[in-house]
Image: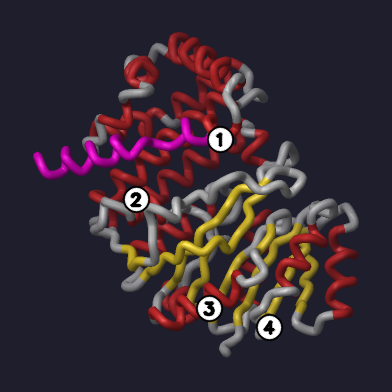
Amino acid sequence: MKKISVIMPVYNVENYLKESIESVINQTYKNLEIIIVDDGSNDSSGEICDEYSKNDKRIKVIHQKNKGLSGARNTALKNATGEYIMFIDSDDIFELDACEKMYNAIKKNKADFVIGNYIYIDDDGTKWDKPVFSKEKYNEFELSIKDYEKSFYIMNSGVWNKIFRKSFLDDLQIEFEEGLPAEDAIFTTYCFIKSTNVCYIPSIVYNYRQRKSDSISVELTHEYFTGINKAYNIIYNNFKANNELEYYRYFYAKSMNYILYKFIDSTKLKKEEKIEIINEMKWFYELGFEINVPTILKPIKYIIESIKENDYEQTLKYFEILSQIRKMLPKELKEKMSKPSAETYREIADNSEEN
């Protein structure tokens, strides 16, 4: 049994931290190195980490000045000694057999990394009815960047439902981009581009908490969208530089829907800020025409056309209409609305064959 380094960045999560740590220390797989990076917390999080480290020698706590999520993960990666790497966010929860199932899968398949199924939980820990990836549709399989039928569904952006072979990451000399949101997406998409063997297992290994507040993805500030713009530019250029734009078209479809609805849901932006952000991200909104992803524009056709015509006043009117509709939707339907349909992806594939 090889050692797994489990990386947990921590910042002001005293209300969730104990449950998260205990989901790691109580794993059925025992050969763990648990690296907790207290990233300058100013609540009791640092003390909680230290207390657990006193009772479990597998826990290594590193206290540092605040560098953000990426900075904390990078610190942990530099200190990791395990043959495999897993990540957990400090407000989320591992299933108790997560490490065991992921280790068995990556060992059996000799993979660069393995992706596991996951499920959303509410702020209070209540699980949603179904996991993110349908167990009826997706059995265990090997992903391919040339597979547009199912691989792009499973290749989600998060690092937290995956196990990586450390030598693979070392060979890439990869780190998390600091100071940007979507750091997971930059990291995982580059790993996928450079991988030779990636596998998926349908077992639920991770519980992803949907917090009501205190999250950058909930705040949706001007800074957040400016960072997203930079991150998406990095991702696009990585795919382009590696001649994988055909697969990127599917990633783009998913990202376009996601970020537009994030923008629509934002409540902290002034009108002037919204217009500035739309203008900054115009290249991304228009990219669908350049790389031939017309179908993703159907549900939001008028929005994209108004952006293309620089009619941002009309764009904001469309956003407001959709915002009011989304406020009335149940959480599951709201989440589904933010993702392209299967028909969208099939039409993208058909469009590729025609060209």
Q: Quadrant of residue 1?
A: bottom right
- Asked whether 343 falls inside the magenta stretch, the response is yes
Disc 1: CA contacts within 10 A as few (<14), some (14-19) or many (>=20): few
Q: Callout 1, which amino acid?
A: Glu
Q: CA distance from mark 4 to mark 2?
A: 40 Å
Describe the element under mark 3 as helix, strand or loop.
Answer: helix
Q: CA distance from mark 3 to mark 1?
A: 31 Å
Residue corresponding to mark 1: 332
Describe the element under mark 2 as helix, strand or loop.
Answer: helix
Residue corresponding to mark 3: 103
Q: CA distance from mark 1 to mark 2?
A: 33 Å
Residue corresponding to mark 4: 30
Describe the element under mark 4 as helix, strand or loop.
Answer: loop
> In the image as oriented, which residue stretches furthest toward the front?
136
Count of labels shown? 4
- Asked whether 79 falls inside the magenta stretch, the response is no
Q: Callout 2, which amino acid?
A: Asn
Q: Callout 3, which amino acid?
A: Tyr
Residue corresponding to mark 2: 237
Chain-order first, disc 4 or disc 3: 4
The overriding secondary structure of the stretch rendered in magenta is helix
